[in-house]
């Protein structure tokens, strides 16, 4: 790939390790065979059996993106990872994105993504894309309600982790470079909306005002704000998907 890949036997969090490398070049990847304190959205932990899955972070420097449009980076990353996972699944199975950027197969979560941005003024100086992809793990022991792995859907064939890491990070990097050279926000949003789960039908959500209710997703703004068919708009962590 022409970038630095740091592979660790163990660390607390690959995001934390990469954030402690101020001189790292764009594209640098930190991957861990075992991650002891992997972090997800809402402060959740991420279960990952050693040597069975991908837990990694990739450094990007999308300085063309203003901070107010940082959700475009989230859309690019989630679509790139979803496409990479799809390439290792049967043609009849396709991943979807659960807002804002979890990757699902049906009703089960195969990948979690956490993007941490460092801003300089109104611009994104550095973005650390952390991801945990369930690849070859067959049994999950945590109380997470709906984990799955690629191996559960591809006939039981193990996927080579090193090759998959290069595929995923290479696609993220190439998609980011293409967008920086010719940004098309509307096309990006349309691709994201097509991949998004719960854009039709009636589904269960909950929030602090209405409790549990039924709705579907109508729109996602460029800042990531979610609009549901109940007419309400939600920022991150303001609404819960009941799976």
Image: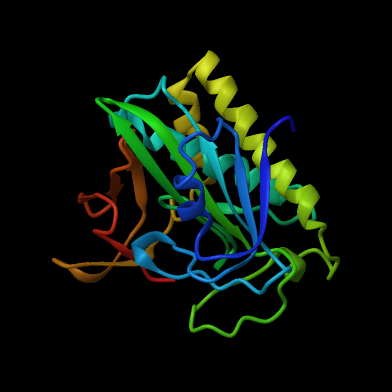
Residue in the image at 36% along x and 29% along y: 124
Q: Residue furthest left?
A: 209
Residue 170 picture location, percent across and down: 69, 36
Identify whether 164 is placed above or below 219. Answer: below
* Quarter of image, res 153: bottom right
Q: Is residue 52 left or right of residue 121?
A: right
Residue 237 placed where, x, y %? 28, 59
Q: Quadrant of the C terminus?
A: bottom left
Residue placed farthest to the top in the image? 181
Q: How is the image coloured?
A: rainbow
- Residue drawn at point x = 50 percent, y = 65 percent: 12
Q: Is residue 197 in view from this perspective?
A: no
Is residue 111 visible in the rendered image? The answer is yes
Q: Name the one closer to the observer, 24 or 78.
A: 24
Frontmost residue, 193 versus 139: 139
- Residue toward you, 215 or 163: 163
Percent across and percent down for residue 42 are: 34, 63
Instruction: Kindly identify the residue that appears in the image at 46 percent across and 50 percent down.
Output: 101
Position of 85 with respect to 198 (left or right) is right
Residue 154, percent across and down? 80, 63
Residue occupying image coordinates x 32% and y 36%: 221
| Image position of 6 with respect to 210: above or below | above
Quadrant of the image for the N terminus? top right
- Marks counted in the figure total 0
Q: Nearer the viewer, residue 167 or 210?
A: 167
């Amino acid at each position: 790939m022409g970038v630095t890949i740091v592979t660790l036997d163990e660390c607390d969090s690959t995001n934390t390790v990469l954030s402690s490398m101020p001189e790292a070049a764009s594209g640098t990847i930190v991957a861990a065979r075992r991650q002891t304190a992997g972090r997800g959205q809402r402060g959740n932990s991420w279960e990952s059996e050693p040597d069975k899955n991908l837990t990694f972070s990739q450094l990007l420097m999308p300085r063309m993106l203003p901070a107010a449009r940082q959700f475009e980076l989230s859309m690019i990353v989630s679509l790139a990872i979803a496409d990479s996972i799809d390439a290792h699944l049967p043609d009849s199975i396709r991943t979807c994105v659960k807002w804002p950027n979890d990757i699902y197969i049906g009703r089960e979560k195969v990948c979690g993504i956490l993007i941490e941005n460092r801003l300089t003024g109104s611009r994104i100086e550095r973005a650390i894309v952390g991801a945990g992809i369930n690849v070859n793990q067959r049994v999950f022991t945590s109380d997470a309600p709906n984990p799955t792995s690629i191996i559960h859907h591809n006939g039981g064939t193990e996927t080579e982790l090193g090759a998959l890491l290069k595929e995923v990070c290479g696609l993220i990097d190439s998609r980011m470079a293409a967008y920086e050279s010719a940004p098309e926000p509307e096309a990006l949003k349309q691709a994201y909306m097509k991949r998004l789960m719960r854009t039709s039908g009636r589904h269960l959500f909950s929030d602090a005002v209405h409790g549990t209710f039924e709705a579907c997703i109508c729109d996602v703004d460029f800042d990531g704000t979610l609009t549901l068919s109940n007419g309400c708009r939600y920022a991150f962590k303001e609404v819960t998907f009941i799976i």
